[in-house]
């Protein structure tokens, strides 16, 4: 079964575990993931419940996709002050999970926790010399000035590198 919140003596414990994505099906969630939609829904329910004074995010996640995370983080940040919000790194709180947890009033970490690393990366492979050596010529067809930026069939130019870095 997908993770569900628990309520103990005025404290709601919301599980934020596994890979985070904007939307997930029941199968994905039951395999250990969490959608930002589902977590947001659990958060709103806990926030609206007058019997809850503290909301705890029980976090064990390496992160996930960016989609949905800025919106969820903004929602949690905007609600601060209504109830105490604590994020617990138990034991991995990285990337998208750390972004969400950073909106809490407080972050607590187990001694062996791994916390941090908000950010993204991309890799560019320049296959042009390999393909030339093998006698393969690639012709790219596109519409739009920047549609081919960063393709692996030619070296990465400085302008594209700067855009990707930005």
Image: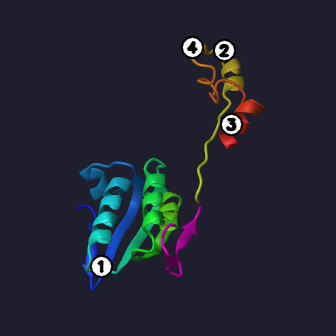
CA gap, disc 3 and disc 2: 31 Å
In the rendered image, which residue does mark 2 sit on? 135
Q: Residue at x 63, y 41 (%)?
A: 123
Q: Which element is circle 1 on?
A: loop
Q: Nearer the viewer, residue 115 or 80?
A: 80
Sequence order check, earlier mark of 1 and 2? 1
In the rendered image, which residue does mark 1 sit on? 52
Q: Residue at x 34, y 70 (%)?
A: 14
In the rendered image, residue 63, in percent from the top left (x then y), is placed at: 48, 58
Sequence order check, earlier mark of 4 and 1? 1
Sequence order check, earlier mark of 3 and 4? 4
Residue stretch rendered in magenta on the structure: 103-117
- Location of residue 53 with respect to 144 vertically, above or below: below
The residue mark sitting in front, 2 or 4, is 4
- The crowding category of the residue bearing disc 2, from other C-alpha atoms within 10 Å (few below 14, some 14 to 19, many at least 20), is few
Q: Which mark is residue 141?
A: 4
């Amino acid at each position: 079964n997908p993770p569900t919140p628990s309520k103990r003596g005025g404290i709601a414990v919301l599980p934020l575990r596994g890979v985070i994505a904007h939307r997930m099906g029941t199968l994905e969630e039951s395999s250990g993931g969490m959608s930002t939609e589902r977590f947001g829904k659990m958060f709103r329910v806990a926030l609206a419940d007058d019997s809850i004074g503290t909301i705890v995010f029980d976090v064990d996640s390496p992160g996930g996709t960016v989609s949905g995370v800025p919106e969820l983080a903004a929602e949690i940040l905007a609600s601060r002050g209504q109830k105490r919000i604590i994020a617990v790194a138990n034991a991995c709180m990285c990337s998208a999970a750390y972004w969400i947890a950073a909106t809490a009033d407080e972050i607590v970490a187990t001694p062996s926790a791994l916390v941090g690393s908000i950010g993204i990366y991309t890799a560019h492979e320049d296959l042009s010399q390999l393909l030339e050596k093998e006698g393969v010529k690639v012709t790219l067809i596109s519409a739009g000035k920047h549609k081919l930026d960063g393709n692996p069939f030619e070296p990465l130019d400085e302008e594209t590198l700067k855009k990707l870095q930005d």
